[in-house]
Amino acid sequence: MSELEFRVAIRDALAEELERDPAVVFFGEDVAVPGGVFKATPGLRERFGPDRVFDTPISELALSGAAYGAAVTGLRPVFEVMFGDFMALAMDSLVNQAAKFWYISREQGTVPLVVRSAVGAGGRFGAIHSQTHGTWFQGIPGLKIVFPSSPAEAKGLLKASIRDDNPVVFLEHKRLYSVKGPPPAPGQEVIALGQAGIARAGDDLTIVSIGKGVPDALAAADALAGDGISVEVVDLRTLRPLDLPTVLASVARTHRVLAVEEGPRTGGWAAGLLGAVAEEGLHDLDDAWILATAETPIPYSPTLEDAFLPQAEAIVESVRSRLAVEVAPA
Amino acid sequence: MSELEFRVAIRDALAEELERDPAVVFFGEDVAVPGGVFKATPGLRERFGPDRVFDTPISELALSGAAYGAAVTGLRPVFEVMFGDFMALAMDSLVNQAAKFWYISREQGTVPLVVRSAVGAGGRFGAIHSQTHGTWFQGIPGLKIVFPSSPAEAKGLLKASIRDDNPVVFLEHKRLYSVKGPPPAPGQEVIALGQAGIARAGDDLTIVSIGKGVPDALAAADALAGDGISVEVVDLRTLRPLDLPTVLASVARTHRVLAVEEGPRTGGWAAGLLGAVAEEGLHDLDDAWILATAETPIPYSPTLEDAFLPQAEAIVESVRSRLAVEVAPA
Amino acid sequence: MSTPTARPPTQALDAYLDAYGRMRLIREFEAAMHRLFLRGEVHGTTHLYAGQEAVAVGVCMALGAEDYVAGTYRGHGHALAKGTAPEPLIAEMLGRASGVCGGRAGSMNVIDLPHGLVGCYGIVGGSIAAALGAGLAAKRQGRVSVGFFGDGAANQAYFHECLNLAAVQRLPVLFVCENNLYAEFTPMADATAGADIAARAAAYAMPAVVVDGNDLWAVRSAAGEAVARARAGEGPTLLECRTYRHYGHSKSDPAPYRTQEEVDRWLERDPLSRARDRLVREGLAEEQIAAVEQATTAELDQAIERALAAPYPDPETEAATEYAP
Amino acid sequence: MSTPTARPPTQALDAYLDAYGRMRLIREFEAAMHRLFLRGEVHGTTHLYAGQEAVAVGVCMALGAEDYVAGTYRGHGHALAKGTAPEPLIAEMLGRASGVCGGRAGSMNVIDLPHGLVGCYGIVGGSIAAALGAGLAAKRQGRVSVGFFGDGAANQAYFHECLNLAAVQRLPVLFVCENNLYAEFTPMADATAGADIAARAAAYAMPAVVVDGNDLWAVRSAAGEAVARARAGEGPTLLECRTYRHYGHSKSDPAPYRTQEEVDRWLERDPLSRARDRLVREGLAEEQIAAVEQATTAELDQAIERALAAPYPDPETEAATEYAP
Ligand SMILES: Cc1ncc(C[n+]2csc(CCOP(=O)(O)OP(=O)(O)O)c2C)c(N)n1
Ligand SMILES: Cc1ncc(C[n+]2csc(CCOP(=O)(O)OP(=O)(O)O)c2C)c(N)n1
Ligand SMILES: [Mg+2]
Ligand SMILES: [Mg+2]
């Protein structure tokens, strides 16, 4: 079966949901006529018309507010905030309007909206076009935060996000757009939100990651298999809600967990995940640690950015040294 | 010696720093002529003049940008964003300008600014005037996040924040403004940022909290002493940087840690702290858990809000049940 | 930018009598909120609408039940004008389970979707965004959307981005600025460069009208024209309604920044008595008006009594979920 | 809003010759960046300023070394115009340790405080905020502050809140909108209600001037007047400079959305050749101009050579700290 490119998976998910439900609309900066700066959305305007797919001014806050207001009055808006870094401008409406509505209205209505953004470093885009904003929103009840790791997940999770009746913050890693992979398996065309996946089974160590971190962890697992270390890779898929049971079940078997995050250790999801694991599964745990980025902004220079990122080699290195340390005589 | 009220401690810190350094300016919505909605800043405009202390339009993003631009060109701005909930509107300039400048400019200049906000629930202000925004910013390298727990800390930490050459997000809990306490002890007029405090020494359990959570934890510790449980209370004071060594040293002695956060468990600082403790001090740890709020927005109704908050009684209850569970026969 | 003077009613006089009744309901409702706040029954803070009744009521007269309204934290008037019943609204202020939002929202954040009240917004400017978004849906549904906001909100990011986007998209939206001369304790002119909010619409080539916000007929007629434009696909309009709040900004504000002379001048232009006088001038009998007033008072008294008798939500049984299923 | 036509130079002709040299430097710098990008030496993305040189150079002619400038991600021209040396600027694009920011910032985020370049901003509208804040300091320091931004930024929150606040505070700020008719791939008029950016200044009672952004003399004179107002304590000014970028939006953009006819029309109005012609008309000798051109080319060639020879930062030895001490 022909391979699916990540950016095409995004496009197909949008097209299928626009087709399926006339309430779905899609808008953003340069997404319609130009088809998006990452070429993810060409052709949608031509197919669904300018009333349902349109370009907007550079007004992230208004886009966020427009999506909220439209979502509580009968539409299912999907909008793009080109780079996740710009989500700081769109935050108020998501946090203080969309995320609150279902609860404070006492369930009078739902807020079915999705905001898509390109995130992540490694593209030499510098400190203000490379951040991953998931953690900015992880502590906001009412929001869901989705971060696919493969083309099949991108399609299945975006379709589920558009069908979800809650506001969804959807992250697309820049370095995944050109990745090709198998299309969704039968029955996986729509992937339930809040359900982590076991990307690889193993016995000695659980590596938990999300988004681009998952292929990196899988590559590391291959290398570590050569060392005789059997790694289980858990793909979180969503940062909120967090599928703790799947992680706990894995750790209960492997007794060791490494959380790999492309972002700073302090205030990141990785530390929070280990905290939750410690709270629930402390006595299953022989070791728990984090591989994250340095506590600085993201550098531009290739040498600095490469060293900054927790790539596959860094994961391998971290596991080897941590396990060695562990067995070293006290 | 006469007691110091929290709001007066804030005012005194501002006045002393405005007096000490002509580069310090202070602005915000209704802070100058009206003296602030929490009556924290009356008299400053009269004393230092309208060029240094002034009221502004309702433009949180511009205030944040103005503070950043002024800070990199020679001023030391302090500005108020009335309620922490509104920080979502001010986020972009703090995250994408102020927090990045020192690093990406390769230390060409510093960004000495402070943004003060009233935070926290319990005042019946509802879901959009009761949030604590510290965790929204905890994952942003370059920022410092300060959250005092007493009048003396409010004064010492605000003075240190104004003298600090980095952007500081300063949180003031609404339910502390009217609290009175001893003024700063000699030598404590300025409290170094990034240094947690031992609010109470104990042997059986470490409770870590910050801001209003500290007096709550201290009240709980008193009650638990009656049960023969000796509680150590660690006052974090800053969420970024995080003083992990102080927490680890305490846990190394007590072997049990409870993190109390007025905010949701998922994506909160408490889970992240326990994760860091697990990473560094797993083998010191007999138990670790979190007392946080439900994963919903903050309710208005008194009965709902009281049940929502991790108050002293809830802390006592949590400790009693967790320790009981622990000693129960398997 | 034109300043229309009040014109002959475009609806039958009884519609204005009915509207006067609603203005009166809002006035008495706010007086009751004030009393209940002092009694400790209303919690936290509350922002009273008294003095501005003609704006919400006059605009809503021009709307259908299915049209959308977004109000502010000073929103009791917006809700009552759009059709929210007094009892669940009072109960919400009191934090009771029978509140329109079950006591979860409170005074600043009331939501009543069944009556087209998309929400009331604690964030200054938030109502502008909600109205913009509702306008996107309204355009497809043949409805219109209204966002109420204050003079202070005209300096907020939302004002600029949302008016521009609404104009670009030609959305059926009324942006209704209630210029009551103060943002909290700050005089409008001190914070608003140019001190002319209606003039800001020109930046977006959007039509704007300055209206006497204390004249029910003037508001109704200006709103009617804007609604007609919106329904005709001609896009958004900015209405600047000049008005005044009778109370301080919020419960805790004695409003020392306003001169007695200024307050008196505005009390002379009280929208309620002006509406009443006009109804008499237009030929309504004193008894007719008095009957409406008595009915209003009776309705409110009963609503308050029922609301006060309602239970608080029980945290044990309250089945709150983070997410919609 | 007045549209001044180019007037006799207010500075000696050699200042214009010097300015022409800087425009030429920018033009050749951008051509070099383009080549180096295609060679894989410049990474990520880059936004070229070619075609807009008269704006940055004309405005900076009216400034002193101590005045502040905030540029955009299309900022190479802003930096060079304000005095940043070509070599450290190129080295920054190349990600070398000798870059003006040590290779940490890259093309979109250049900072050069010693030359008064507060920063270049990857966030559309960010330069407006930086200029506002620098204006707060500048007012106390007797300096002025300039924020460059594009037509697309006029729809951003920052534009509205910052222009209003600058006007309220009467800050010495020039808001310089470089209207090059497109925001990325979107025509200005499609996203900007009213399609008149200078007119938006009226919303804040702020003076605005529309300038031919491809005429060095016109830009210099309009900027000079605005700077004079600012220094005199008369507050901010909005300059809308009509101009055009010669390249696509960024490295990856062939700009199919622009007609060849439109491109040709603007190439005829190329600011560089117009400046050169005017210098000749004003009586400068061909040799004088050629000498400057050769010097510029030589300076740039040497800068490129040196920058290419510089090492990349070494992550091992790079002692980065999260915080200032
Ligand atoms: C974004 C934001 N900033 C500040 C506040 C605090 N605040 C509440 S009401 C208010 C004044 C608003 O004035 P205006 O828009 O004129 O409305 P009015 O209260 O006069 O009806 C302010 C500053 C807020 N609620 N939201
Ligand atoms: C807040 C924000 N939104 C979107 C972008 C993506 N983006 C980069 S440049 C650009 C177009 C800006 O157009 P304009 O302001 O006219 O400047 P020009 O590129 O034409 O110089 C956009 C949308 C951004 N960098 N920042
Ligand atoms: Mg007002
Ligand atoms: Mg442009």
Image (cartoon, coloured by chain):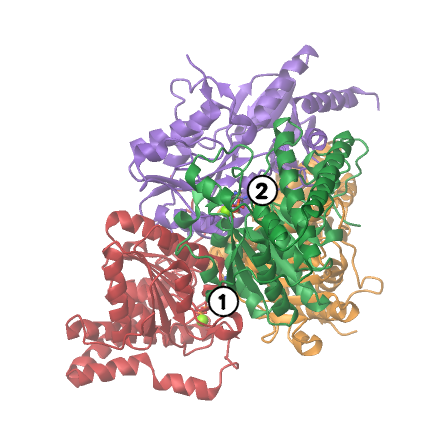
Chain colours: A purple, B orange, C red, D green
Looking at the rendered structure, whether the residues under marks 1 and 2 are on a common chain is answered as yes
Specify the quadrant of the image occupied by residue A321: top right
> Which secondary structure, mark 1?
helix
Residue B58 seen in the figure: yes
Residue B70 shown left or right of residue C117 in the figure: right
Q: Residue at x 58, y 22 (%)?
A: A215
Picture coordinates of residue A126, whole percent (x, y): 64, 38
Q: Tell me the amino acid under the disc marked 1.
A: Tyr
Residue C222 shown left or right of residue C244 in the figure: left
Q: Which residue lies under the disc numbered 1?
A: D204
Crowding at mark 2 (Cα within 10 Å: few <14, some 14-19, many 20+): many
Which residue is more in the foreground, C136 or A212?
C136
Q: Chain of mark 1?
A: D
The answer to whether residue C127 is above or below residue A289 is: below
Q: Residue at x 45, y 20 (%)?
A: A4
Which residue is more in the foreground, D265 or D130?
D265
The answer to whether residue D207 is above or below residue A104 is: below
Residue C175 shown left or right of residue A127 in the figure: left
Q: Which residue lies under the disc numbered 2?
A: D50
The answer to whether residue A181 is above or below residue D256 is: above
Picture coordinates of residue B110, whole percent (x, y): 74, 53
Quadrant assignment for the N terminus of chain C: bottom left
Q: Chain of mark 2?
A: D
